[in-house]
Image (cartoon, helix red, strand yellow):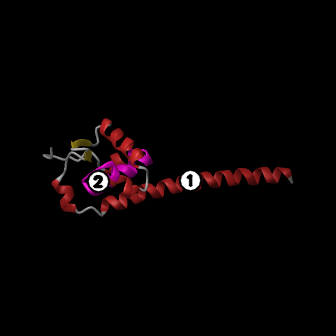
Amino acid sequence: MYKQEGIRKKHLATLEKIKENLEKLNEKIDVLIELRKVNEKELQKFPDSSLDVITLLNLPDHLRKTAVAICRNGRATAEEIADQTNRARAMESSYLNQLVIMGYLKKQRKGKKTCFYVERGNES
């Protein structure tokens, strides 16, 4: 009886790991679907974008969510990104600055606000 309970617990743990992996895979597929929705003309305008699909998929989940939000907006402040991701502004600011340090984003100060953006081709 105790042996069967131990086996059942091992099976449940294995199933839980499978479930977690499937959820991560679903999140990555959602990113691909979202990127696929981007207009083909927009992609052709900016062939040198540093945030391509492979790059996004290789980012940690928390940074990917921020990167996808900035790709949707083009240019945005940490506050605007936080509104989309439902995370704290300070957290998004940290994530955006990490992406700047990694070389994926650029930032530009305008008055008291800082805008983050993906540098594409001839954009400055």
CB-based contact (under 8 Å), mark 1 and mark 2: no
Where does residue 29 sit, x and y in percent of width and height? Answer: 42, 58
The reply, left or right, for residue 61 in relation to residue 38 is right
Numbered disc 1: secondary structure:
helix
The amino acid type of the residue labelled 1 equals Glu
Where does residue 3 sit, x and y in percent of width and height? Answer: 83, 50
Residue 46 vertical position relative to residue 102 in the rendered view, above or below: below
Tell me the quadrant of the picture where the N terminus can be found. bottom right
Of all residues, the one furthest to the top in this rendering is: 101
Numbered disc 2: secondary structure:
helix
Residue at (15%, 47%) from the top-left corner? 123
Start and end of the magenta stretch?
Answer: 58-79
Question: Which residue is the site of mark 1?
Answer: 20
Question: Which residue is the site of mark 2?
Answer: 71
Residue at (29%, 57%) from the top-left corner? 72
Q: Quadrant of residue 119?
A: top left
Please state which of residues 61 and 58 is positioned toward the viewer in this rendering. 61
